[in-house]
Amino acid sequence: MIFIQLICAHLLGDFILQPDSWVAEKEKRKLKSGYLYLHVLIHTVLSFIFLWNIELWWVALTVGISHFMIDAAKLSFQTVKNKRNWFFIDQALHVLVIAGISFYFNEFSFGFLKDHHLLKILAGAVFLTMPASVFIRLLLSSWTPVPETTGNIQTESLSSAGKYIGILERLLVFTFIMVNHWEGVGFMVAAKSVFRFSDLAQAKQRKLTEYVLIGTLLSFGMAVLTGILIK
């Protein structure tokens, strides 16, 4: 399958065979960096090796040229503030090029859009991301505790960390249910109890503990109920 072959070549060329020193040099000298052209050459060669078909030389060349254009755009427009965004844009564009090539060879179709079971699973997964976060936030809005100073206890947290932790835990619970591994749900509950509620016990804030407990039960409950409904 050409898609898998080119993805393997991409992963090997972009992450395994590209040292951090090359990345730093490219970011510093941009299009003047020789490592940029060496990196593109490596991708072209790897693509040809993984395809291993002389008749598909143009595919490897297409991958190399597109890789140069995408990386050149990234180096030209990337700044310290948007570096993370450009990393994901860069990777998404590389994958889209590979997907486009695979689509040309009829390796992909849109027949999955007619699979009702797959669409139900997709709908459930999407619901458990931001929509579920909104529901939980609204349900807890009247109980939001006011942070208290607790001596040497550090109460600060990463920006939006709770929201993304909730999304990840719901998706994991949903996945465990879809593959009929309910023991994984128990593992998730135990793991979060160990890492989260030990800190709350030290903080000695009963309202905050109750607030987090209700939020956690709502989060897990939504994931379990959604999984059951889909099944």
Image: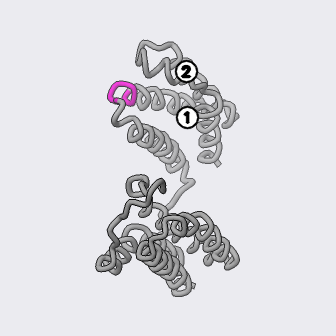
First of labels 1, 2 by sequence position: 2
Res. 114 in view = no
Q: Quadrant of residue 49?
A: top right
In the depicted structure, whether residue 103 falls above or below residue 65: below
**Quick one: which residue is furthest to the front in this view?**
151
Which residue has dot 2 on it?
A: 22
Q: Nearer the viewer, residue 68 or 218?
A: 218
Could you say where residue 26 lies in the image, as x and y percent from the top left?
A: 47, 20
Going 39% across and 37% down the picture, which residue do you hit?
86
Q: Main structural element of the magenta stretch: helix, strand or loop?
A: helix
Magenta residues (range): 73-79
Question: Which amino acid type is marked by label 2?
Answer: Trp
Question: Which amino acid type is marked by label 1?
Answer: Val
Could you say where residue 170 lies in the image, as x and y percent from the top left?
A: 51, 71
Which residue has dot 1 on it?
A: 59
Q: Nearer the viewer, residue 68 or 139?
A: 139
Residue 219 part of the magenta-drawn span: no
